[in-house]
Amino acid sequence: MSSIRQQNFLLRKEKILAMAEILLLENNQDITLGELALELDIAKGTIYKHFKSKNQLYLELIILNEQRLLEISKKYNHDMKTYVSQYMLYNMLNSNRTILLHVIEEKLTNNERKLKDLFDVLYQVREERIIKIKDMTGAYLQALESAMSIRDYLSYIWTVTYGASLLLNSSHYQKAIGSRERLIKLYINQALMTPDKITSVE
């Protein structure tokens, strides 16, 4: 494949992924490759040139999302407070994407056995993201004289972020929410102030 054809091939793949994400979030549920092809005004067979199955397309969307999070880790790996804020805002301001991609990943993890190579890529990206912020997180916890481990603190941030995203994405609970901005700020502040409250357990 010539470099121009390869470039066009990659650009078309990016367009397919971008449109798939838009449709998925608009519908907040499953989409068909037929719907995707219709929206892009291309043949359904063209999509199969890039993705062997809809599950592969979904998993590549999850990897793309994880790569965006990796970029946040690279950009803010010298300031823990800014990193936590940006990480949480990325997820909470797009709570429907956060929840939907997580649900899809859980489904694929339990039911898809043919995409091991792509799962390996996903886990490698996640590992790289953690490595990028490991030293910064350790220094932050040490400065607060916290007994919490790096792994537990990062898991805690994810838990707060996902729980907040669930609430912000819930049509039922949104009726009881006053200011979304104030609530989001509260969650971020909570994640940042928790480590200095931890003491060693005898």
Image (spheres, grey):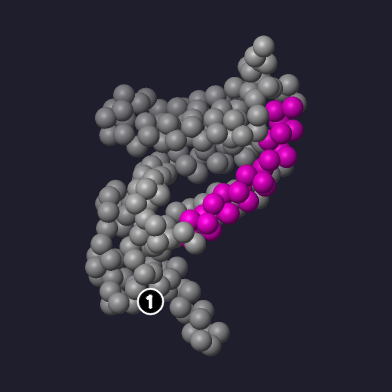
> Which quadrant does the C terminus fall into?
top right
Report the residue at 48% width, 56% height from top.
Answer: 119
Q: Please, is residue 119 above or below residue 184 in the view?
A: below
Apparent side of residue 141 relative to residue 104 in the rendered image (left or right):
right
Q: How crowded is mark 1: few (under 14 residues within 10 Å), some or many (20 or more)?
A: few
List x then y, in percent, for residue 56.
39, 62
Judge left or right: residue 154 versus residue 5.
right
Residue at which label 1 appears: 49
| Span highlighted in magenta in the image | 118-142
In the foreground, 30 or 118: 118
Q: To which quarter of the image does residue 191 belong?
A: top right
Residue at the front extreme? 113
The percent coordinates of residue 38 (x first, y second) are 25, 70
- 123 part of magenta stretch: yes
Residue type of the residue flagged with mark 1:
Lys
Predominant SS of the magenta segment: helix
Q: Is residue 18 visible?
A: no
- Asked whether residue 51 is in view, the answer is yes
Say if 202 sits above or below 34 in the image: above
Counting from the top left corner in percent of width and height, residue 159 is at 48, 32
Tell me what residue is drawn at x 74 percent, y 33 percent: 139
Give the residue drawn at x 45%, y 38%: 92
Per the image, label 1 sits on a secondary structure element best described as loop
Asked whether 66 falls inside the magenta stretch, the response is: no
Give percent across and percent down for residue 129. Answer: 61, 48
Q: Which of 3 and 168 is in front in this view?
A: 3
Q: In this view, does 123 lie above or below 46?
A: above
The residue positioned 51% from the left and 79% from the top of the image is: 7
